Image: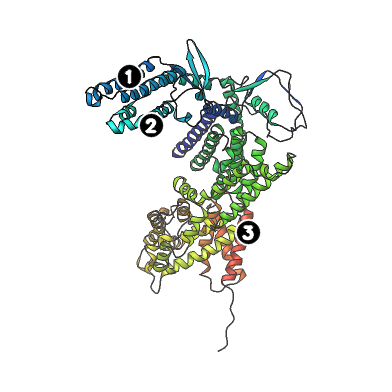
C-alpha cells in the first residue's frame, strides 16, 4: 500500500513538473517572431535566389531611428508669439522714472540748470527712440541653449501661420541694455556732480522681450515631430528579388532580410502557434527525453530529486534565454552570454556522462527555439559543453575548473574561427573581434560561478560532489579521528575495506570516490560500544558474559548507532546508505549458530539475530558489503595462500548470493567474478609472505 502510494506520488509530481515546464515554454515562446532565415551582414548568401512572396515593409534599424530622433532633438525649432503690450509697458516705465527724476531734482532753483535738463531730455529721448526701434524689430526671449548660437532657427506666429526666422534677426534684452549704457556713459558726469540716480534707474530697468516662447505649442510641435519618425524606409513588392545566391549580404539586403524575418503577417494566430509549440515540446519531452530515461536509465526516471533538478535546469535556461532574446539591450547582449557550459559542468558533477550530456543537449534543443542561427548555436554550445565535461571528468582537484575554463575558451575560439572562415569572409581584425567573440569569452568566464553553485545545489537538492567526498575522505576530520581514537581496530578495518573497495569499483566503472568514502564510514556506529567488536578487544571477550541474543543485539546496534552519529554530524544521505546496507538483511552467523547448537530442540527468533537492512541497491554499496565481510573473515585465516584466500572469498560472496542480498542491485555474474579476482589479488598483496631475517 505504502509502495503504491509512493509510486503514484512520483507519477503525479513528475506530471506536474512536465505541465509546469510546457506551460512556461508556451507562454514565453516568441509567437510573433519567426526566425525564417539565418544570416549575418557581410556573409555570402548560400541559399537559392530569395523572391518576396508578399509585400512587406523594410524596417529601419534601431540605430537609424535613434539617429533621426537625435537629429530632431539637436535641430529643434521653438515656436514663439508676439506680445504687443510689452513695448508699451517698458516705454511707460522709463518715461515715468525720468519724469519723477526731473520733478524731484529740479524743483528748486538751486538745481535749476537748464543745460543739465537738456542733457537729461536728450538722453531720455535717445533711449526711448532706441527702445521703440528695437521693439518694432523685435526683442526675442533667448533660451539657454541658444545663447552661444545666434544662427538658431525659430518660428514666430503671425496671424494664423508661423514664419521662420533666425535668433540673430532680433534684439535681446542684454544687447539693448548694453547700447543704453553707451548713451549713459556720455552723460554719467552729471550723475556724479548732482547725485542724480540715473544709474539706479537703469539697473532696475527690465527690458522684457516681446517675442516670447510658446512652451505648450513648442512641446506639442516636438511631440508631433517625434511621432512623425517613420519605422519603415520603404516597401518590398511581391516578386521582388531580395537576395541572390552567391552575393554578399550588404546593408540594404541585410535590412530586407531582417524585415522579412520580423514580418508577422502570417504568424498572428496565437492559438495555432501555441498548438504547434505544445506538439513540438511534447515530441521533445516524450519522444526524446522520456524514452531515453525509460529505455536506458529507468532507475533515474522517477526519482523526485533528479526530476526536480532537471526541470529546474530546463526552466532556468529557458527563462535566461527568453530574457536575453527579448530584451537584448540595444543589441549588446544575446543568448550566447548565457553560460551554457556552466550547466554542463553542474550536470557532470552529479551524474555520469551519458545522463549529463543527454540532459544538456535537451536544454540546448529547447534554447535553440530562441536562437537566430539555430545550427550554429547548437553546434557551438554542444562542442563547448562536451569539452567542459571531458575536462571535469576528474574533479578531485579544484584547479581542474581552471583547466576546464581554458579548454572551453579555446573550443569557443576554434569554433568561432571555423564559422568565420566558412562564411567566406576576408580576414579583418575589426570584424574578427566582433561582439559575438566577446560574448563567448564572457560566457566562459561565468564558469567560475561553478564553486558557489555546487555548494548551493548540494544543500538544496541533496547531491554529493567529488569536492565534498574528498573532504569526507580526509582521515583528519573530526569523525574519522574519533573513530581512530575510540575504535582503532575498526578504523584500521575501515581503511582496509576502503582500499579493497576502491580497486573493485574502479574495475566495475562505478563511483570510486563515493565507494571509498562510504567504506570509511560504514562502521562508524562502533564508536558507541567499541569493546563489543573483536577488532577492538584486548584480552577478555565481553561477549562471554552475555547471552547469544544480547550479544547479537549489541552487534546489530552499530547500524542504528551509525545512522544516529551520521545524522548528528550531517553526513550526506548517500553515505548513510552505506551504513544501513553494508550487512543487508544477513544474520549474525556466529551468535545465531551458537544459539542453535546450544538449543537444538528450539526454534530461534530470527529477528533477534538479523540485521535490519535494507539490502544494497547500487554497485558501490554491494562492493562494500562484500569487502566488509571478506576483510573481516580474512583475519581468521591461520596461514595465507592463494588457495585459502580464494576459498574464503568464494564462500563469502556465494553465501551472499544464496542469501539473496544482491537481488535489488543491477549487477552481473561477470562483474561478481571480476570483483572476486580483485579481492584475491589485493588480499595476497596485503598478506604476502616476508623473509625471516637472520639473527
Asked whether 169 or 94 is in front, the reply is 94
| Residue displayed at 41% across by 62% down | 479
- Indicate the secondary structure of the residue bearing disc 2: helix
Location of residue 369 in the rendering, given as x and y in whole percent from the top left corner: 61, 32
**Residue 552 seen in this snapshot:** yes
Residue sticking out furthest to the top: 160
Coloration mode: rainbow
With 3 as the anchor, is 112 left or right in this view?
A: left
Location of residue 167 in the rendering, given as x and y in whole percent from the top left corner: 50, 24
Circle 2 residue: 185
- Indicate the secondary structure of the residue bearing disc 1: helix
- Packing grade of label 3 (10 A; few <14, some 14-19, many >=20) is some
- Spatial CA distance of label 1 from label 3 is 121 Å
Circle 1 residue: 95
Q: Nearer the viewer, mark 3 or mark 2?
A: 2
Residue sticking out furthest to the right: 246
Asked whether 122 or 417 is in front, the reply is 122
401 relative to 219, above or below = below
Q: Earlier in the sequence, mark 3 or mark 2?
A: 2
Location of residue 98 in the rendering, given as x and y in whole percent from the top left corner: 31, 22
With 410 as the anchor, is 574 left or right in this view?
A: left
| Residue displayed at 24% across by 23% down | 104
**Which quarter of the image is occupied by the C terminus?**
bottom right
- Spatial CA distance of label 3 from label 2 is 117 Å
Q: Earlier in the sequence, mark 2 or mark 1?
A: 1
Circle 3 residue: 674
- Indicate the secondary structure of the residue bearing disc 3: helix
**Which quarter of the image is occupied by the N terminus?**
top left
Q: Which image quarter: residue 135?
A: top left
Amino acid at each position: 500500500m505504502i509502495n503504491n502510494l509512493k509510486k503514484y506520488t512520483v507519477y503525479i509530481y513528475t506530471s506536474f513538473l512536465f505541465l509546469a515546464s510546457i506551460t512556461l515554454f508556451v507562454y514565453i515562446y516568441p509567437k510573433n517572431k519567426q526566425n525564417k532565415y539565418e544570416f549575418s551582414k557581410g556573409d555570402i548568401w548560400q541559399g537559392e535566389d530569395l523572391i518576396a512572396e508578399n509585400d512587406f515593409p523594410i524596417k529601419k534599424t534601431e540605430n537609424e531611428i535613434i539617429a533621426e530622433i537625435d537629429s530632431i532633438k539637436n535641430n529643434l525649432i521653438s515656436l514663439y508669439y508676439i506680445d504687443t503690450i510689452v513695448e508699451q509697458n517698458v516705454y511707460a516705465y522709463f518715461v515715468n522714472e525720468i519724469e519723477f527724476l526731473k520733478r524731484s531734482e529740479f524743483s528748486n532753483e538751486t538745481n535749476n540748470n537748464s543745460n543739465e535738463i537738456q542733457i537729461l531730455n536728450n538722453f531720455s529721448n535717445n533711449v526711448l527712440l532706441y527702445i521703440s526701434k528695437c521693439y518694432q524689430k523685435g526683442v526675442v526671449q533667448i533660451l539657454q541653449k541658444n545663447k552661444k548660437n545666434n544662427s538658431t532657427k525659430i518660428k514666430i506666429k503671425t496671424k494664423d501661420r508661423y514664419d521662420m526666422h533666425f535668433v540673430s534677426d532680433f534684439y535681446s534684452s542684454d544687447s539693448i541694455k548694453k547700447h543704453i549704457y553707451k548713451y549713459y556713459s556720455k552723460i554719467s558726469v552729471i550723475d556724479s556732480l548732482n547725485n542724480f540716480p540715473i544709474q539706479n534707474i537703469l539697473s532696475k530697468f527690465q527690458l522684457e522681450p516681446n517675442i516670447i516662447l510658446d512652451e505648450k505649442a513648442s512641446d506639442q510641435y516636438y511631440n508631433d515631430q517625434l511621432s512623425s519618425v517613420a519605422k519603415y524606409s520603404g516597401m518590398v513588392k511581391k516578386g521582388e528579388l531580395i537576395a541572390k545566391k552567391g552575393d554578399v549580404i550588404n546593408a540594404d539586403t541585410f535590412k530586407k532580410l531582417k524585415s522579412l524575418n520580423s514580418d508577422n503577417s502570417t504568424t498572428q494566430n496565437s492559438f495555432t502557434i501555441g498548438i504547434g509549440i505544445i506538439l513540438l515540446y511534447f515530441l521533445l519531452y516524450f519522444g526524446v527525453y522520456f524514452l531515453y530515461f525509460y529505455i536506458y536509465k529507468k532507475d533515474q526516471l522517477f526519482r523526485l530529486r533528479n526530476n526536480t533538478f532537471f526541470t529546474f535546469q530546463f526552466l532556468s535556461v529557458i527563462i535566461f534565454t527568453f530574457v536575453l532574446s527579448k530584451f537584448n539591450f540595444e543589441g549588446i547582449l544575446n543568448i550566447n552570454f548565457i553560460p551554457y557550459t556552466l550547466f554542463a559542468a553542474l550536470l557532470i558533477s552529479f551524474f555520469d556522462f551519458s545522463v549529463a550530456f543527454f540532459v544538456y543537449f535537451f536544454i540546448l534543443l529547447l534554447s535553440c527555439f530562441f536562437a537566430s542561427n539555430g545550427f550554429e548555436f547548437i553546434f557551438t554550445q554542444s562542442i563547448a559543453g562536451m569539452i567542459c565535461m571531458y575536462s571535469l571528468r576528474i574533479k578531485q582537484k579544484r584547479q581542474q575548473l581552471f583547466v576546464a575554463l581554458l579548454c572551453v575558451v579555446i573550443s569557443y575560439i576554434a569554433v568561432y574561427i571555423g564559422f568565420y572562415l566558412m562564411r567566406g569572409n576576408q580576414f579583418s581584425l575589426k570584424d574578427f573581434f566582433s561582439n559575438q567573440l566577446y560574448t563567448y569569452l564572457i560566457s566562459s568566464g561565468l564558469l567560475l560561478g561553478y564553486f558557489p553553485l555546487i555548494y548551493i545545489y548540494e544543500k538544496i537538492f541533496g547531491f554529493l560532489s567529488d569536492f565534498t567526498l574528498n573532504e569526507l575522505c580526509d582521515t583528519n576530520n573530526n569523525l574519522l579521528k574519533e573513530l581512530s581514537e575510540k575504535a582503532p581496530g575498526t578504523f584500521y578495518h575501515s581503511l582496509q575495506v576502503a582500499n579493497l573497495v576502491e580497486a573493485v569499483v574502479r574495475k566495475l566503472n562505478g563511483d570510486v570516490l563515493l565507494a571509498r568514502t562510504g567504506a570509511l564510514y560504514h562502521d562508524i556506529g562502533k564508536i558507541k560500544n567499541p569493546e563489543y567488536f573483536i577488532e577492538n578487544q584486548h584480552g577478555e571477550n565481553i561477549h562471554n558474559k552475555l547471552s547469544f541474543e544480547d550479544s547479537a543485539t549489541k552487534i546489530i546496534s552499530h547500524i542504528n548507532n551509525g545512522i544516529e552519529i551520521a545524522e548528528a554530524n550531517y553526513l550526506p544521505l548517500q553515505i548513510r546508505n552505506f551504513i544501513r546496507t553494508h550487512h543487508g538483511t544477513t544474520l549474525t552467523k556466529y551468535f545465531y549458530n551458537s544459539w542453535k547448537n546450544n538449543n537444538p530442540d528450539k526454534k530461534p527468533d530470527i529477528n533477534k539475530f538479523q540485521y535490519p537492512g535494507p539490502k544494497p541497491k547500487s554497485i558501490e554499496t554491494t562492493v562494500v558489503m562484500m569487502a566488509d565481510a571478506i576483510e573481516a573473515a580474512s583475519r581468521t585465516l591461520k596461514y595465507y595462500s592463494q588457495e585459502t584466500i580464494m576459498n574464503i572469498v568464494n564462500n563469502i560472496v556465494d553465501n551472499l548470493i544464496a542469501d539473496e542480498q544482491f537481488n535489488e542491485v543491477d549487477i552481473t555474474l561477470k562483474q561478481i567474478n571480476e570483483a572476486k579476482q580483485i579481492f584475491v589479488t589485493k588480499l595476497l598483496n596485503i598478506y604476502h609472505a616476508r623473509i625471516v631475517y637472520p639473527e
